[in-house]
Amino acid sequence: MNLDRLANRASPPLGGFNLTFLAIEVRRLVRNRRTLLITIVVPVILFELFKVNRKLAAASSSEFGPAFSMVGIAVYGSMLAASAGGARVAIERALGWSRQLRLTPLRPAAYIAIKLVTAMLLGLVSVVVVFVLGANDGVDLPIATWLTIGLLAWLTSLVFAALGLFLGYLLPSENALQVIGPLVGVLSLVGGLFIPLSLMPDLVQQIAPFTPTYGVVEIARFPLVGGSFDVLWLVNVVGWTAAFGVLAALLFRRDTRRT
């Protein structure tokens, strides 16, 4: 009788997505020192490492100057933070939390959405940190350009929040976060975050449009470099986000069905 009631009970509004659950997830992220280090420290170190290159580019009046480099690092930091935040579900899986959710009316889509939002908040912190460093380092842009680039760099990192969730459900807890760093690094290199694609080998230029990084980088830098907007950039972002999100939801269902 009790089982029948559990099976037939009404689904909560929005499938269980609510501000209380979201606030709990945010507090858990803030308390995790390793995640905060990834979010803040790694972009800062990378920014400092690229300082010499930015100064050389500025001295030579290169189009790939300080602002160009800063946006690439901001996007990288946002992607790394968002993917690491999403991958934290691997720890929850190891603790049996996914199976416990089987006893609740929480829908997979709502759970995935909450995880994506919290991962995106980490990405926003990373973008803000890099932009503060850039402003202090002499990057001078109109306020509207700062805001537009920051918003685009943050929103497009949704792709990597979804990637982190997917890997978190796919890999064991001890491997998920270890895979995230190198994977995001390789995708960033191939996607043109640190070295412009025009300077990369022909093979890399041919592969780049099919990577999850390509649309993110091109959209984030568009307000800076100008030109014509390519709708394929948006297709790239939406397509990869949907693919990773669906895969994460399917793996979440698999976990909650286990006994």
Image (cartoon, rainbow, N blue to C red):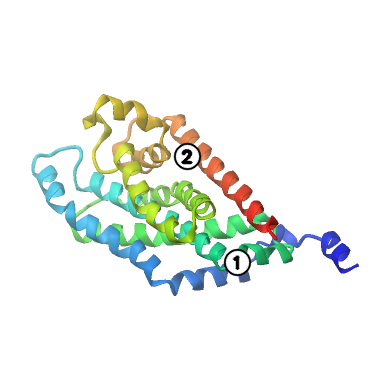
Hey, which residue is sitting farthest front in the picture?
259
User: Residue at horizontal 48%, vertical 60%?
Assistant: 173
Q: Amino acid at mark 2?
A: Val
Q: Are marks 1 and 2 in contact (CB under 8 Å)?
A: no
User: Residue at horizontal 53%, vertical 44%?
Assistant: 244
Residue 14's spot in the image, x, y percent?
A: 70, 58
Give residue 206's quadrant in the image. top left
Q: Mark 1 or mark 2, which has the lower sequence index?
A: 1
Residue 178 against residue 64 in the figure, above or below: below
Tell me: 11 left or right of 45.
right
Instruction: Identify the residue under disc 1.
Output: 96
Q: CA distance from mark 1 to mark 2?
A: 32 Å
Residue 94 against residue 205 in the figure, above or below: below
Residue 245 against residue 100 in the figure, above or below: above
Q: Amino acid at mark 1?
A: Gly
Give residue 243's quadrant in the image. top right
Residue 150's spot in the image, x, y percent?
A: 37, 52
Number of numbered discs visible in the structure rendering: 2
Task: Tell me the SS state at disc 1.
Answer: loop
Task: In this rendered view, identify the residue nearer to me: 106 or 132.
Answer: 106
Residue 165's spot in the image, x, y percent?
A: 52, 53
Residue 28's spot in the image, x, y percent?
A: 50, 72
Instruction: Identify the residue under disc 2.
Output: 237
Q: Which numbered disc, 1 or 2, marks the residue closer to the eye?
A: 1
